[in-house]
Image (spheres, grey):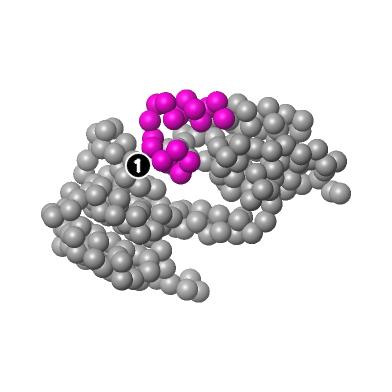
Amino acid sequence: MDEKVRIFMCEDDENLGMLLREYLQAKGFIVDLFPDGEAGEKAFSKEKYDLCILDVMMPKKDGFELSKDIRMMNVDIPIVFLTAKTMKEDIVEGFKSGADDYLTKPFSMEELLLRIEAILRRVNGKKLAKEGPFRFGKFIFDWSKQTLKTKNGEQIKLTTKENDLLTLLCENQNELLDRNAALKKIWGVVDYFNARSMDVYITKLRKLLKDDDRIEILNIHSKGYKLITPPADED
């Protein structure tokens, strides 16, 4: 890595925390480790971090509460939960409180590393994508102006939700867009009603893109969506 990634970690299991810190430091990361949520909250405000790893069951302040505090200070920082909890309600609560990923114990350190690297690729890719309009097939999508137009100048003004969802699809074009991640990013809450609303917007986007039959928005069962795009047409 040209510039080392700084990881904020809260884990009350001293042995596990030290093992994870040593492993990630050996992989080139800078890792600051804290033993509980209160100590973590105080430290987070004093340093700039690139990613958070939070245990859920911690003394003084649990990981869910800490993640909400972190989101108040930094709305975009990726958060990974480590927990022994496997109930569906706990996973939903994790995403509601700001999780980007959720790893249940026991887990392998290699799996954690792969998930961290995947999240950082998405974050870095989004930063690059935000520099200008997306161009694919017959279309030019300008997320900053909320417009979708063809090469011949026909222009459609998108609603905010259409714009946000198409932006996420374009940032991940030809790759899987995780359903829960999209719900959390756009609607803020992962639940049945917002999921149905997102399905409606996916249908609307399909209609907007139907003039180019090379473009598809695939529904990947139980996982999410994939925007299939060809290269942009030549002028």
Q: Observer-nearest residue: 199 or 174?
A: 199
Query: Picture quarter containing residue 146?
Result: top right
Q: Determine the main secondary structure of the stretch shown in magenta.
A: helix
- Up/down of 10 relative to 135, above or below: below
Image side of residue 30 versus residue 128, left or right: left
Question: Would residue 194 be counted in the magenta stretch?
Answer: yes
* Residue in the image at 38% along x and 30% along y: 191
At x 46%, y 58%, the residue is 120
Pick out the residue farthest to the left.
Answer: 59
Identify the image quadrant of residue 22. bottom left
Q: Is residue 174 magenta?
A: no
Q: Position of residue 138 (x, y in %)?
A: 78, 40
Residue in the picture at 57% in, 30% down: 201
> What's under tag 1, amino acid-wise?
Phe
Residue extent of the magenta highlight: 184-201
Q: Secondary structure at mark 1?
A: helix
Determine the residue positioned at 26% across, 68% down. Answer: 43
Q: Is residue 187 above or below residue 63?
A: above
Q: Residues within 10 Å of mark 1 (few under 14, many from 20)?
A: many
Q: Quadrant of residue 87?
A: top left
Q: Position of residue 224 (x, y in %)?
A: 50, 34
In terms of depth relative to the viewer, which is nearer, 216 or 92?
92
Camera-nearest residue between 206 and 104:
206
Q: Is residue 179 left or right of residue 126?
A: left
Q: Is residue 57 above or below residue 52?
A: above
Residue that lies at the very extreme toward the bottom in this rendered image: 2
Locate residue 143 relative to residue 152 in the image: left or right.
left
Q: Pointer 1: what residue?
A: 95
